[in-house]
Every structure is written in C-alpha cells, then in structure tokens.
Amino acid sequence: MEQRPDERLRLLAVARGASMASTLGRRPLDTRLGALIAAMAAAAGAAVAIESGTIVSSVSAEAGRLGAVVALTLVLQLCSIRVYGRGSVSVSAIGILAAVFLLDAGVAMTVAALAALAQWVRSRGQAHKGIFDCANYGLAAGAAALAYHTFADQSRLLGAVLAGCLYAGLNNGLLCLAMCLAEQTPWRRLWLERFHWARYHFLLFGPLALAASVAYEQIGIVGLAAFALPPALMVLSVRQYLERTTAAVEEIRDANARLRRAHRDTIAALSRSMEAKDLYTGGHTERVAGVAVALAARLGYDGEQLEAIEIGALLHDVGKIGIPEKILRKQGPLEADEWAEIRRHPVVSDYILSDLDLDPIVRQCARWSHERIDGRGYPDGLRGEEIPLPARIVFVADALDALTSDRPYRAGGSVISALSEIEDNAGTQFCPQVVAALRAIWRTNPKLLAVEQPPQLDAA
C-alpha cells in the first residue's frame, strides 16, 4: 500500500532529526555535550573557589558598588529578547564587564553567574542549560578580567576593548560549540547563521562598559545608569519590533513549508503517472524515496540536500516514460535491443530534468543511480568514487525495493534476504558505505525499511 502524505512527512522528519531551530534542551543530552558542560562547570567552580577570599572581602568593602553593578546586570539580562525561537539576545555583557572594571575577577564571575541564573529562572529551562549558562558567563567574565587587568596599567581603553572582545568571543564560541554538539551541525555553519552578523556589535561592549564604569566613579549611580540606559532602551525597542513581526515570520515559514510540500507532492504525482505504465510497480518510487531519505540522513545529509535526494529518488526513473509498455510489462527475459532501451532511460531522465531549476543532486540521482561500483553499470560506466554518493544511495534503495516487491515472474522476498543479497554484492555492485548504513538502519529503526505491497491492478 502506498504511504499516505502525512506518513511520508513523518518518516522524512524522523530521518532528518530535530529542526535546526532546536537549542540545548530539545534533544536528549549528548554525551559530548554533557562532558563539555561538566568540564566548564568544574573550571568555573575552581576559579571562583580560588577567588573566594577576595569575593568575601569585596562584598563587605564594596557593598554599594557591588549592589549597583548587580542591579544593572540583572536589569539588562531581564530585558533580553527571544530571536525567532533561536535563543535570546541581551546586552547584560555591559553590566558584567562593568563588574570586571570596577571590582575583582571573582566578584565579576559571581555577577555573571547571577545573570545567567536569572535568565534560566525566567525561561524555566532545563537544569543542564542553567549549569551551562552559569559556567559560560563565569568563564567569559574571568577571561575578560584577566585581559583587562593585564593591560589596564598601560591603557584602560585598550584593556577594556580586549576584555570585551575576549568576553564576547569566549561566550559565543562556547555557546556555538554546545549548539553544534546538541544539533549535530558544523560549528562554522552555526556561527555564520546565528552569531556572525553581530560580530562588530561585540566590539562596543568593552568601551561602553568602561564609560559606564568611569561615570560611576565620577558621579555615582546616575552616571552608571546614564550609559546603561541607551542600550537597554535599544533592546526593548527591538523586543517590541520582534514581537510584532514574529507572527508574520511564522506565517511566511508555514507558507514556505506548504509550498515545499506541494512541490514534493507534484513531483510524486509525476512519478506515479510514469508508474501507471507498469501495473506491477505502483508506489515503487515513493518507497525508494523513503529508504533513500533514511540512508542519506544516516550518512550525514540534512536540510536542502536531503530534500534533493528525496526528489532525485522520486524522479530517478522518470526516463522510463519513453520506454514502450510492451518492454516494461514483458514477463520473460529481455532481448538485446530491449535491454538497450532500458539502459537508455537514465540519459532520458537527465535530459527531461536538464532545463529545470533543480539541485544538482537531483540530476545525479536520475543519471547515475544505475551505475555499479565495479564500473559495469549504465549509462556511463562510472566506477567507485566517480559515482556521486547520492546516486549510490538511490541505487541501494532501488535494489532493496526491487528485491522485496512482487514481480510478474517472482514473488518479493523478505527484507532480511534482500539485505543479505545486497551485502553479498557490496564492493562490486553496491557501495559498501551505503550498505553499512542500510544494515545500521535495519538494526536501529527497521520500520523505515518495512515494505508494504500496493494493491495490484487488473490488466485490461
């Protein structure tokens, strides 16, 4: 039976994993992420323990100054804004850096941890996220304090600029690394998508915090508030703007999702119209697409490339539309000239798709998904790594469905027997890397390989 559209979408979502919009709490805690959080927490805790003596003395000697800085930092942190479901943005770094410039390193790290704790309580996040944020803010504040006190004797401005850059770089770098581990997405990609745009803004944190610190030293709490108020008002303005535009953004995302589904369904309808010529292969291309998506996700594909492989699998046999029905429906062995017609269809598929604005992966699947690793495939006789990996994926998915589907000359076999035959031909006919992924899917999520036969139509 052919899979319903909602079931196909569910399988595609399973193969892709969680959305890129996920943050540290959306997936089960990755082992490497847990180790990173534990290491950061241990480092931050050790640093605070070393500075515990100065923290106690500063609290008693600089209570007023500490209270002002804590109040400023918490206000700036609580003014943070959610950015389209991809985390939050705040300017609390100004308050934390002011603590670095006005107090010692241990106190600054404590203030930073309090800001992170306030954000965690406000967002009602998971415990490991709160621990990560406290350690991240604390370590960034400690590094900033080290940079500032190293260069402040030469130039307070130089020390402030370096402290601000180091704070922002470490804070965002560790956050990006954690997201990379949680979402299984390359670090560079995450940085470019979520942090790169604000790289020049980070340069201003240090000088602005220094100006606020100097103003506090000269005229007290009024001076501190005077320099902290503009960025706070800016954040509030952006927050109101985002609240008003978030609904519109979500509507656009939903419209794009519907459009992509319609695009995919149109392609599926095209493949079904081609299959209507062959009474015995109904639903073949969609079953192949389902297995190909699972294999591709297992091998590291995601996003638009994963969708391209799905579309390539749906269209990989579209060139058969030019093959006479008497050849497609022939129950006995094919003659040499009939085999020549069959072997020509990938070229026809490529020609049909050549003028369409499609991802190159789609045409790779259409033209080369019948090439063998040993070079004995068709139409171009490619071998080994010459065959693009997406085409090798579709080839294995196609073979699995062919071996498990009923044909007029034989009944379909079981998935286990098909796996055995495919593994026997790994390295000659099929790509060993893809075959290994197929076996792994069978072990971990066999439902993705379940084959349900479509109802057979009676020939006229």
Image (cartoon, rainbow, N blue to C red):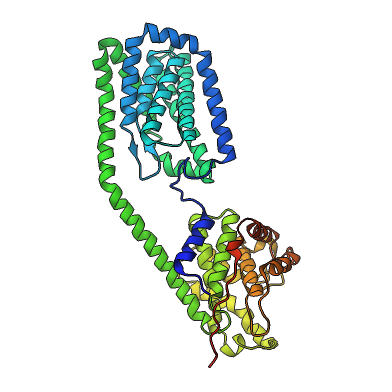
Q: Residue drawn at (33%, 12%), measured in percent from left and top?
A: 65
Viewer-closest of 327 and 261: 261
Query: Does the rendering let one see residue 379?
Result: no
Residue 219 higher or lower than 232, as above or below: above
Q: Position of residue 300 (x, y in %)?
A: 58, 53
Picture layout, residue 434 above or below residue 223: below
Q: How many marks?
A: 0
Q: Could you say which is closer to the camera, residue 270 or residue 123?
A: 123
Q: Is residue 453 left or right of residue 78?
A: right
In this rendering, position of residue 330 left or right of residue 149: right
User: Can you say whether 320 is above or below 95 in the image?
Assistant: below
Residue 20, horizontal then vertical, whole percent? 46, 48
Which quadrant would residue 265 be assigned to in this image?
Answer: bottom left
Q: Quadrant of residue 33?
A: top right
Taking the image as shown, residue 368 lies to the left or right of residue 103, namely right
Q: Residue at x 56, y 41 (%)?
A: 30
Determine which quarter of the picture holds residue 78. top left
User: Which residue is at a point 44% across and 9% down the rendered structure image?
Assistant: 56
In percent of width and height, residue 305 lies at: 51, 58
Q: Is residue 396 visible?
A: yes
- Residue in the picture at 52% in, 55% down: 16
Q: Is residue 28 above or below residue 343?
A: above
- Percent coordinates x, y for residue 310 in the rendering: 52, 65
Task: Using the image as rendered, state which of residue 205 and residue 141 is in the foreground.
Answer: 141
